[in-house]
Amino acid sequence: MNSSAVHRLRLVSVPEGISFILLLICSVLKRTTSFDAVPVMGMVHGILFILYVVFWIQAWQTQKWEPKRGILLFVLSVLPLGGFFAEKTLGQEERGELKPATA
């Protein structure tokens, strides 16, 4: 099912996941070295996370996902590698390989 809301969510999921990992790396570097990119990466990740949540809400409303699927996609956004898994499942849904209403 080709929904623009699902497509937008899919497009933002990988950059959000990458920014989360980079933020974790920057946090470690801040505490172990004099390198401090946490303010910049924190802002980048925050913006991408907000976009993810907005697109997640839009996709949930347009696709009429079951609560289990909607919650799973939100939980994936707060896990360090979750954005990559979200992109994979959303890609399958877009190509019609996965029913939109299942988890």
Image: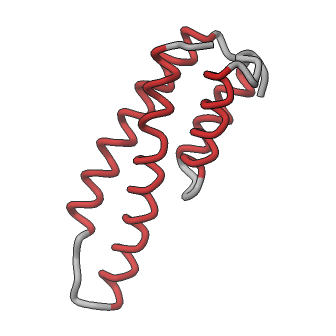
The quarter of the image holding the C terminus is top right
Q: Position of residue 12 (x, y in %)?
A: 42, 37
Q: How many marks?
A: 0
**Residue reaching furthest bottom?**
33
Horizontal side of 10 relative to 65 (left or right) equals: left
Q: Position of residue 8 (x, y in %)?
A: 43, 26
Towards the viewer: 16 or 89: 89
Q: Position of residue 9 (x, y in %)?
A: 48, 29
**Vertical relation: 41 (above or below) 58:** below
Q: Residue at x 53, y 18 (%)?
A: 59
Q: Position of residue 77 (x, y in %)?
A: 54, 44
Q: Residue at x 59, y 49 (%)?
A: 82
Horizontal side of 92 relative to 78 (left or right) equals: right
Q: Residue at x 34, y 73 (%)?
A: 26
Q: Residue at x 64, y 10 (%)?
A: 64
Horizontal side of 89 relative to 31 (left or right) equals: right
**Vertical relation: 99 (above or below) 12:** above
Quarter-of-image position of residue 85: top right
The quarter of the image holding the N terminus is top right
